[in-house]
Amino acid sequence: MDISVVIPLYNEAESLPELEAWISRIMRENNFSYEILFVDDGSTDRSWEVIEKLAAFNENIRAFRFRRNYGKAAALNTGFHATRGHYVVTMDADLQDSPDEIPGLVEKIRSEKLDLVSGWKKKRYDNALTKNLPSKLYNWTTSRMSGIRLHDMNCGLKIYRQEVVKNIEVDGEMHRYIPVIAKWAGFAKIGEKVVAHQARKYGTTKFGMERFVNGFLDLATIMFVGKFGKRPMHLFGTFGLLIFFIGFFILTYLTIGKFFFDFISIANRPIFYLGILFLIVGLQLFMSGFIAELVTRNAAVKHHYQIEKQIRA
């Protein structure tokens, strides 16, 4: 199979028939063998009913329905593990991502032998104040911290080699950082392509302003996990030893002063309690590093999402 199209969705019943027809037409025109994987993230509207009707007429459709809303990352992760295509395309279900871009994405990832190509919505139809400006700040910060030079890190329209999606785990709200996750997994050949951005035709956005605060917190998490997930002692141990020896030096200085330089009282000095605090905090950080090492070496925690229904699993 040439292409798997993974579409996470939540309450997008109105857009699904048009989106399915659009994707199918593009695939036929380009002679791609394909599958469409709808992952219904616990929708409360008629989305699953619409998917069932579409699947009855198109055998290339496969679908999964969660029992409740787990989030976009969980939906993408489920879709990734179910894909069978040589290339995997992800796109949103709200018609703001154009299926017309798929052949161009396929050509770029093939010709340049890339692992991943991310779309860049250079011209956007979103609100400039609430979405465009914060997105630019977020993308600039993410690029500088991760070293991945992408203009639109969170664009839903991307294409991957199948090997990439089979070797990464996307959880929480980490769908924003899939290129970063892929890079840390060893897939560093990442490209970018300008793609069209459509104005929203049906419904309203499912993301509020809180996504920007959560986004930066998630970035800090992914950078920590990427650099120290397999060796947490390198972080906790380094800081722990540094703080411990600062406290040890302070207390040693006070002790020497007490016995050799006639310090009247060291217990009344604020620096004495600061030294004790540094000793305790340093020791705690060092022990936290040991515990983290034990956890990472002896436990592999996996999340299982409860799929209520599925079509052509």
Image: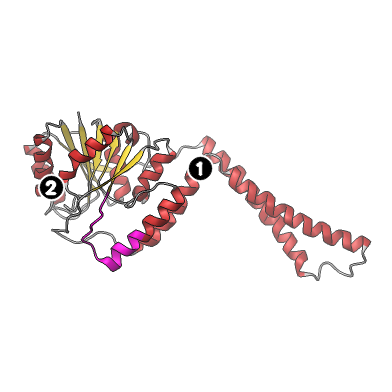
Which residue is more in the foreground, 29 or 311?
A: 29
Question: Is residue 48 toward the left or the right of residue 284 in the image?
Answer: left
Query: Would residue 86 be visible to someone looking at this image?
Result: yes
Find residue 88 and name its label. Answer: none
Q: Which mark is residue 229?
A: 1
**Element under label 1?**
loop
Residue farthest along the left direction in this orientation: 57
Q: Alpha carbon of mark 2 to alpha carbon of mark 1: how far?
A: 39 Å
User: Residue 120 in the image: x percent, y percent?
Assistant: 27, 50
Closest to the observer, 47 or 22: 22
Magenta stretch, residue numbers: 120-136
Element type at mark 2: helix
| Callout 2 amino acid | Leu
Residue at numbered disc 2: 19
x and y percentages locating residue 178 in the rendered image? 36, 45
Disc 1 residue type? Gly
Q: Is residue 191 above or below residue 154?
A: above
> Residue 106: x, y in percent?
22, 36
Quadrant where the image shows the C terminus: top left
Residue 125: which quarter of the image? bottom left
